[in-house]
């Protein structure tokens, strides 16, 4: 399956029987009707590359606003459920060296974004003023650590039976009638676990506005072709290393630390 054919998420929120999420594989906001798997493409997140993968990670609902917290992206995006507008607030400036947000802490009035490396500062967003500031090193953070409050798959024994890939990235939530639901990590399916029957139901995601998404994905594909790795197919990290190594040997007959290593680091950060 091509990357642009995949729809899934790291995390999602449920509102009025629908799951809202940021797609893992490219920049896209989706809504899925949980009862049926009917899926709607709602648009993209502004001020980010449309081919950006894993742009968001943590997500939460507050006062009819959905907060999409950055993972590899530079912004937190706030989706208003009433008027369907999206607001982008810059957490990392474009000129800054990229970093990954490893943890998000939700306080009463503030959100803290903890980077994956110590040499980057913690960022803080005031949810009332929407002002972002840097936090002094050594400060203690009080609030809910969002990455530690996910519902993992309730029956790990079934993962092997159903051949579920990337099970460590498979999160969901409990719904009514003791039904747990989530999205397959590799895309395009909603999964429901029924506790009373100890069984899984796998529901394909049925796109309701296919024409709109098709037009958008043509732009995503063009942007992908501008990147150094010109392929849409899912590539495992080891395969990527071998491919890039062969490319550099052909072009430079060298594997200097200033070329191959820096490229791998940049791609990992992106």
Image (cartoon, rainbow, N blue to C red):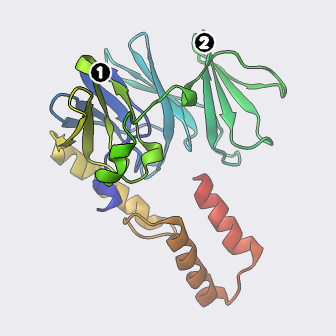
Q: Quadrant of the N terminus?
A: bottom left
Q: Which residue is drawn at the image coordinates 52% and 25% (left, top)? A: 149
Spot occupied by residue 221 in the image (x, y as percentages of width and height): 35, 60
Q: Which mark is residue 267?
A: none
Count of labels shown? Answer: 2
Identify the element where label 1 is drawn.
Answer: loop
Q: Are there few (<14), some (14-19), or many (20+) residues within 10 Å of tag 1?
A: few
Quadrant of the image occupied by residue 42: top left
Between 17 and 153, the one nearer to me in the picture: 153
Quadrant of the image occupied by residue 179: top left
Q: Is residue 220 left or right of residue 253?
A: left
Q: Is residue 192 left or right of residue 88?
A: left
Location of mark 1 (residue): 175
Q: Which mark is residue 129?
A: 2
Q: Which residue is drawn at the image coordinates 21% and 37% (left, top)? A: 39
3D distance between C-alphas at marks 1 and 2: 34 Å
Q: Is residue 16 visible?
A: no
Q: Are there few (<14), some (14-19), or many (20+) residues within 10 Å of tag 2?
A: few
């Amino acid at each position: 399956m091509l990357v642009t054919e995949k729809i899934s998420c790291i995390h999602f929120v449920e509102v009025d029987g629908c799951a809202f999420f940021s797609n893992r594989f490219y920049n896209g906001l989706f809504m899925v009707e949980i009862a049926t798997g009917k899926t709607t493409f709602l648009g993209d997140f502004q001020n980010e590359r449309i081919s950006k993968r894993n742009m968001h990670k943590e997500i939460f609902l507050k006062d009819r606003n959905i907060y999409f917290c950055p993972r590899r992206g530079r912004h937190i995006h706030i989706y208003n459920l009433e008027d369907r507008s999206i607001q982008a607030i810059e957490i990392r400036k474009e000129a800054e060296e990229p970093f990954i947000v490893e943890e998000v802490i939700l306080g009463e009035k503030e959100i803290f974004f903890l980077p994956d490396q110590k040499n980057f500062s913690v960022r803080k967003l005031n949810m009332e003023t929407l002002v972002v500031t840097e936090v002094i090193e050594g400060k203690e953070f009080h609030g809910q650590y969002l990455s530690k409050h996910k519902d993992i798959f309730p029956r790990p024994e079934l993962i092997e039976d159903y051949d579920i890939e990337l099970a460590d990235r498979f999160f969901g939530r409990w719904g009514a009638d003791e039904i747990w639901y989530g999205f397959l990590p590799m895309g395009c399916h909603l999964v429901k676990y029924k506790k009373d029957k100890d069984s899984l139901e796998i529901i394909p995601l049925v796109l309701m506005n296919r024409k709109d998404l098709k037009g958008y994905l043509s732009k995503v594909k063009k942007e992908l072709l501008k990147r150094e790795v010109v392929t849409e197919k899912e590539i495992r990290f080891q395969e990527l290393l071998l491919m890039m190594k062969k490319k550099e040997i052909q072009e430079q007959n060298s594997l200097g630390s200033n070329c191959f290593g820096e490229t791998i680091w940049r791609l990992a950060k992106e």
